[in-house]
Amino acid sequence: MNKAKTVLKWSLIVLLILLVVSTLGIVAYTQIATAAPEAVAEEALLSTTEVLVESADWLVFRPAGSTPATGLIFYPGALVDPRAYAPFAQEIAAAGYLVVIPPMPLNLAVLNPNEGEKIMETFPEIEHWALGGHSLGGVMATQFVKNFPWAAEGLALWGAYPAGGDDVSCRILDAVSIYGTQDGLSTPEEILASQLLLPPDTIYVPIEGGNHAQFGWYGNQRGDLPAGITHLEQQAQTVAATIKMLERIEAGKSEDKQGKG
């Protein structure tokens, strides 16, 4: 009996060691694999005369000199440093909106898809909220909208589409799906094949020549296709389509939707 107990004890110890080693290996891999922000993204983390930037629990971009009534919570793509989206956030905030980008555990939004609820509670002055996200971040933003249908009025998907179980087609929601025609990871075919999971009046904005990686500033991405337009051109179109969605929810109406945003 004592021998059996000893074998069981050491078996449990070995399993615990293997679990710890595996966990440390996963953590190390995600840190190594995470795409770092490029220089232009680092520069966008500095406050300007138009936008105040804070970086405590989250990256927060506020329009200077005004109190916004509408905000966008943006979930980063998988294994992408949240700072890589700072140039986009700067432009959206400069247009008069609060933008909050939450860092995710191991840089995977799937590990904390409900962070938006905490953010909303922290900014009670915001009257209208939209969720947004790039790639996996967009998947998790859609999941949040499904699980908290009363919390958000808008949804902005950048190179992303809902998971099969996240049907928000019956939600009262102003949704925009922005995608690149050269996206090799969230392909146009996959984007359009998921239309039944989004509200029927969702606006689809194809960016001609846009690819997957140019929805952030973190360099090229394996499996993506070369872009046919510049990074700044893709950013400008993405920001413009997102701001139009924010304008609609702030106005409390959707009758000004014009097909392609």
Image (spheres, rainbow, N blue to C red):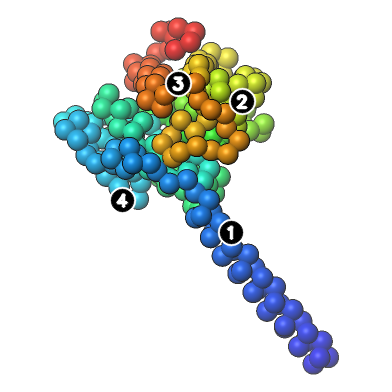
Q: Say which residue label 4 marks.
A: 56
Q: Amino acid at mark 3?
A: Ile
Give how far apart the Cα atoms at labels 1 and 4 are: 25 Å
Q: Is residue 79 above or below residue 209?
A: below
Report x, y in % for residue 119.
38, 42
Give how far apart the Cα atoms at labels 3 and 1 are: 35 Å
Give how far apart the Cα atoms at labels 1 and 2 are: 28 Å
Query: Which residue occupies 22% across, 39% down?
Result: 47
Q: Say which residue label 2 marks.
A: 187
Quadrant containing the N terminus is bottom right
Report x, y in % for residue 15.
70, 73
Residue 26 is labelled as 1
Indicate the quadrant where residue 89 lies.
Answer: top left
First reached walking from the N terminus: tag 4 or tag 3: 4
Q: Amino acid at mark 1?
A: Ile
Query: Which residue occupies 59% across, 63% down?
Result: 25
Front position in the image: 172 or 204: 204
Report if residue 207 is visible in the image. yes
Q: Residues within 10 Å of mark 3 (few under 14, many from 20)?
A: some
Q: In the drawing, does residue 217 fall left or right of residue 8?
A: left
First reached walking from the N terminus: tag 3 or tag 1: 1
Residue 229 is labelled as 3
Q: Amino acid at mark 2?
A: Thr
Q: In the drawing, does residue 18 fall left or right of residue 39?
A: right
Q: Amino acid at mark 4?
A: Ala
Front position in the image: 22 or 220: 220
